[in-house]
Image (cartoon, coloured by chain):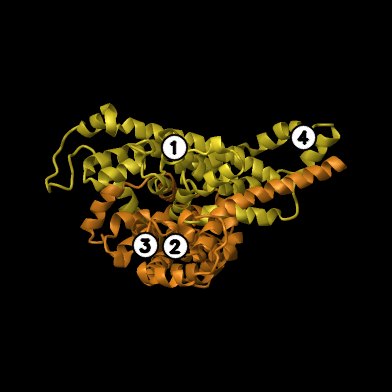
Amino acid sequence: MRSRAYPLYFAGGALVLYGLFYVLPSLLGFYYAFTDWNSYSSEVNFVGLANFRLIFTSGGSSNYLLYLRNTVVFTVATILLKTAIALGLALLLTNGIRRLAYFHRVVMYLPAVLPMLVVSLVFKSILNPATGLLNTFLRGVGLDFMAQRWLVDVNWALPSVIGVDTWRGVGYIMVIMIAGLQSIPKDYYEAAAIDGASGMASFFRITLPLMMPVLTVTTVLNLLYGLKVFDIVFVLTNGGPGRATDTVYTAIFDEFSKGRYGVATTLSTLLFLIMIVLGYFVIRLMHREAEE
Amino acid sequence: MRIRRVQGVINHALAAAVSLIMFVPVYLVIVNSLKTKAEASSMGAGLPSALQWENFATVIEKGKLVTAFGNSVLYAVGATLIGTTVAALAAYVLSRNRTRLNRGLYFFLIMGIAMPTNFVTLMKVMQVTHLINTQLGIILLYSSMSIPFSVFLIYAFVGTIPRELDEAAIIDGCSPIRLFFSVIYPLLTPVLVTAGVLNLLGIWNEFLLPLYYLNSSAYWPMTLAVYNFFGQFQADWSLVSADIVLTIVPVIIVYLFAQRFILSGMTAGSVKG
């Protein structure tokens, strides 16, 4: 009865598209990671672990471990910054102000719907060391010492990219947190106030514990995004200066455009393995949320 | 009481300051799109001395934006329709008939939310299927990329539609296809709009797939056209700004009209990479 009313071929379209363009390439990656596949020759030879050895032992200018380190630094920094700032803003827009709160929410979420490409291009001009708006502003208010060579300085490039990405993503995390805050019953705070709890105490004893599930979800979102980051780095710095801001995905694109498909695939496959393990926990987490 | 009022003023000032910072880039591209090349050279925040509306005409012509706009609409609308429809069909049967196999298939599909794309081997797949550098290829790619999240959103929503409706329709002799399209599909409208709008904006803003798989500039969407235009006219921020304004105006319009759906989708699913 069930199987006749809900035939499995309904799922066919989704399974075929997803299987062909999403799953199959990832599986093929496991094969090509062991080959010297490239754009210069039509022959594809089996080379064993050569690509993996290159990635894990190479030093100097093409240090793949550096890209991995950059990706991890980017991911951890954006998780911490976005979570802290978004939580502050969410509290401000739910408890701090009543009037205009919805207006501010709409404006603060705006960066998240803009194309990453556009955001990056505009920030490239804002962060221009000589003529950019940020340094002009800093000099204008007498904070000359804070004016840096943002995207051009080896030490400032990655922090600048992290800053721009936080600007772009914080509104999105904030919206999720506002929903979380609104679902906490008001009675808890009233009861705490009657018992003489301070604002601090009710934040640490009520808000934070009850926000834990939401904070887990936003952390997972930021984690999945951070490990796959591409556009913003590609446009802001294209991995530069030198390779100071290259991440896993920009390195993959770089290898791809050089025609070194085997190495590019190996990097992709390593990322796939990491993310599939994370994905398993994410799915379990999301499933629990959905069941509740 | 006075302390509370002072606190209130500080809070409002803080919120206004943050909103201002969030709005600065949009403001910058709008004012600079109306300046002359010399005025816009430093992408400053000042207002233009005279409005240069012809900048828009120039970029539309030089940036081949009419074609690019058409391409973006084709990709975003086409892929959203295909992706959301196949996702709805799948989510519906998998949610209604929860056998062991179907639960497995559901997890398999939503695993894609975490999974990274292997662009290199995907190129191989595109070559073998002769979809590389074709518009159909890009539409199918975008459709498949949208499937995991759409299935996740719609699956949860199907659970809220009473099963009695299905049973009544089946007793009346409805075929499975008719049952889905005349009974279930209309009831899914809210979640389909949410998933649809999120996919539409996501695809409109994306530029990695065309960068990898579309060589012919005739097939480029707005984002890639902007990127390329920037490469050519880097020194001319007034034109680049005008190009950017034309790219983000549709996004902002859709966002303002559909923000309720977007914000509800965000919080219902709490997920989107």
Amino acid at circle 1: Leu
Q: CA distance from mark 3 to mark 1?
A: 27 Å
Inspect this view and state whether residue B237 appears: yes
Q: CA distance from mark 4 to mark 2?
A: 53 Å
- Across and down, in percent, residue B54 comes to 46, 72
Between label 3 and label 2, give the one nearer the viewer: 2
Report crowding for label 3: few under 14, some 14 to 19, many 20 or more residues within 10 A (C-alpha): many
Which residue in the protein does label 3 denote? B225
Q: Do badges 3 and 1 share one subunit?
A: no
Which residue in the protein does label 2 denote? B37
Per the rendering, the colour in which chain A appears is yellow
- Across and down, in percent, residue B242 comes to 46, 64
Contact between marks 3 and 2 (CB within 8 A): the answer is no
- Across and down, in percent, residue B139 comes to 35, 63
Q: CA distance from mark 4 to mark 3?
A: 52 Å
Marked residue chain, label 3: B
Q: Do badges 3 and 2 share one subunit?
A: yes
Q: Earlier in the sequence, mark 4 or mark 1?
A: 1
Contact between marks 4 and 2 (CB within 8 A): the answer is no
Which residue in the protein does label 1 denote? A158
User: Tag on residue A199?
Assistant: 4
Inspect this view and state whether residue B156 appears: no
